[in-house]
Image (cartoon, grey):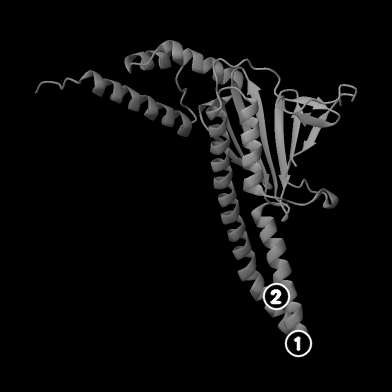
Amino acid sequence: MSERTYSEDEMAALLERAAELQAHSARTNERSRGLTLTELEAIAEEAGLNPEHLRQAASEMEKLGPSLLGKSVRTTKTHVHVEQWVDGELTVEAIEDIVDMLRQRFGSGLPASMGGMGEGTLEQVGRMLEWKHVSASGIETSVRMKPRDGRVHLQLGQRVGLASPVVEGLSYGGILAGFVGIISGGVLDSVLIGFLTFFVLSLIAVPAVTYADRVWRKKKHRNLEELSERVAGLIATHQDPGQVQTPVLTPVAGRVVLPADEEVDESVPVAQHARTRST
């Protein structure tokens, strides 16, 4: 029986799939040594990819980190985070549209008199811009945009809790069960009834609150991923290869002024740290 002959397209598909299987094996088997860059170049060349592009990607990964390959999504006990890299420059028009979109999406949060940020604040540290917002329910959101070598590093985060879902389930579920237990014990004038009510409700409330908290956080994560894509899309929309990129913001008297803003009095001293309220 003669051995089958594969076409060029089939060979490329086979080699690409073999690389995927090898990468999966490297992730699941601690003893696997993975693939060297030379080995990856050979596979890429056989698959019809330019090895120079692979070397450039490897160089960018060393410099910028693995998140350049796609979104980086992670969760801590109190926050959800999404990171990604976007090709292009952070233009003034993109900043204007991003801030406008964020204002419309999140609306007015806690006023400054209550420790909030109204419609959000825009801050600048070097070339990095960070928009912050605190909702009326206390959810903190931040959107960081850091220009780096013709790309923009997006870092989005939300504070979604004071502790982990398990701890919050024990706390809030226990408080709810205790409150009902005290009321039932008082109404029936029986400490035993109150304790039994607390115990039974705890068995129900604690897991229920923990589950609901986890589902809510997953939803917040999905929303944050969608928001990251919207910000990335606005950055990509406002790319002009012929546009000369200058510092996008100018700190003046404690506020951040876009270059398109009206002229300011030059006698006003420049603040050391720029901060503005997006009003």
Q: Is residue 106 above or below residue 48?
A: below
Within 10 Å of disc 2 (Cα), the crowding (few <14, some 14-19, many 20+) is many
Q: Is residue 111 above or below residue 32?
A: below
Which element type, helix, strand or loop, lies under badge 2?
helix
Label tally: 2
Q: Give the image location of residue 267, x and y in percent.
A: 90, 22
Is residue 178 placed above or below 277 in the rendered structure?
below
**Whole-percent x, y for residue 213 in the image:** 62, 57
Q: Residue furthest front?
A: 262
Residue at 33 percent of width and 27 percent of height: 17
Task: Provide the residue designation for mark 2.
Answer: 198
Q: Which quadrant of the view contains residue 178?
A: bottom right
Give the residue displayed 61% in from the left and 41% down from the top: 101
Observer-nearest of 28 and 241: 241
Q: Amino acid at mark 2?
A: Phe
Residue 16, given in percent of the width and then of the height, sits at 34, 24
Q: Nearer the viewer, residue 205 or 278?
A: 278
Instruction: From the viewer's side, name the closer residue of 30 and 70.
Output: 70
The amino acid sitting under disc 1 is: Val
Q: Which quarter of the figure is the N terminus placed in?
A: top left
Residue to which mark 1 is pinned: 187
Mark 1 → mark 2, Cα distance in angstroms? 14 Å
